[in-house]
Image (tube, helix red, strand yellow):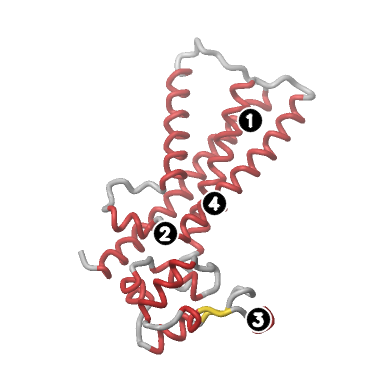
Amino acid sequence: MSSSQIVESAHRFSRKRAILWVLLGATLLFLAAINLLRIWTGEGVDPDHLDFWGRRFAWFADVGLAMLILATGGGFRISRRVRALMNDEITSRNRSLALAVGFWVAMLLCLALAAVDSFRLLVAGRAIMAIVTCSLGASLIAFGVFELRTYRDA
Amino acid sequence: MHERLENRLRDERTRRGLTQAELAAMAEVSRKTINTVENGIFIPSTVLALRLARALGVNVETLFQLPASDRL
């Protein structure tokens, strides 16, 4: 593959990847919203419920995937040279900014849940899941949006 | 354009009749890197600045300079 083909492949894959990150982040935020609703309505956790373990497994898989993407940039089936261009300096900077967004979302949600806990006791597991899901979702959306912004005028 | 760095990357590239994709291939960087540096969204590292300068056959100072108000 020539240098210009590698550059074009990296360009194409990077754009698609950024869109996928936004979609995955939005899905995580949707799941977090459902979880927060359950916290608000005071629904407890029942390990004997039929789909409890299925839901837990799905959550761990989703969150694990999101963490893997944030840590590595993904694209493991793409050639190493193309991947190196996709994960260049600007992407590293965007990742740092996105992780900072996730950190602040986590802090704000912790404060909000601590405030709610003053009035009604929260189920720790649900609160932890909401914080993790929300902050990862926000990070992924931020990562995707920052990446898409770098393509303006390109 | 970033207020702390003046860059002439777009001028030097277009003067040679190169597209962003062609310069990216010559410097072995991504198109988004060229685009963000040209638009002043991203301040390149020393390594990247040297790589861009080498690809265009100019000194780094030709491409990137501190604004006049920042010079000693």
Q: Residue furthest front?
A: B72
* Rendered position, A93 above or below A106: below
| Frontmost residue, B36 versus A133 | B36
Task: Please report, as a chain letter, where disc 1 is located.
Answer: A
Q: Position of residue B25 (x, y in %)?
A: 31, 71
Depth check, mark 4 against mark 3: the one in front is: 3
Q: Label 2 sits on what residue type?
A: Asp
Q: Secondary structure at mark 1?
A: helix
Q: Secondary structure at mark 3?
A: loop
Q: Earlier in the sequence, mark 4 or mark 2?
A: 2
Give the Cα distance between marks 4 and 1.
Answer: 30 Å
Depth check, mark 1 against mark 3: the one in front is: 3
Give the Cα distance between marks 2 and 1.
Answer: 39 Å
Task: Please report, as a chain letter, where disc 2 is located.
Answer: A
Asked if badges 4 and 1 are on one and the same chain, I answer yes
Q: Residue at x 48, y 58 (%)?
A: A147
- Few, some or many C-alpha atoms within 10 Å of disc 3 (few <14, some 14-19, many ≥20)? few
User: Do the residues under discs 2 and 3 have CB atoms within 8 angstroms?
Assistant: no
Give the Cα distance between marks 4 and 3.
Answer: 30 Å
Can you identify the residue that label 3 sits on? B71
**Quadrant of the rendered structure where residue A12 is?**
bottom left
Q: Residue at x 46, y 47 (%)?
A: A23
- Few, some or many C-alpha atoms within 10 Å of disc 4 (few <14, some 14-19, many ≥20)? some
Can you identify the residue that label 2 sits on? A88
| Frontmost residue, A2 versus A154 | A2
Give the Cα distance between marks 2 and 3.
Answer: 30 Å
Q: Label 1 sits on what residue type?
A: Leu
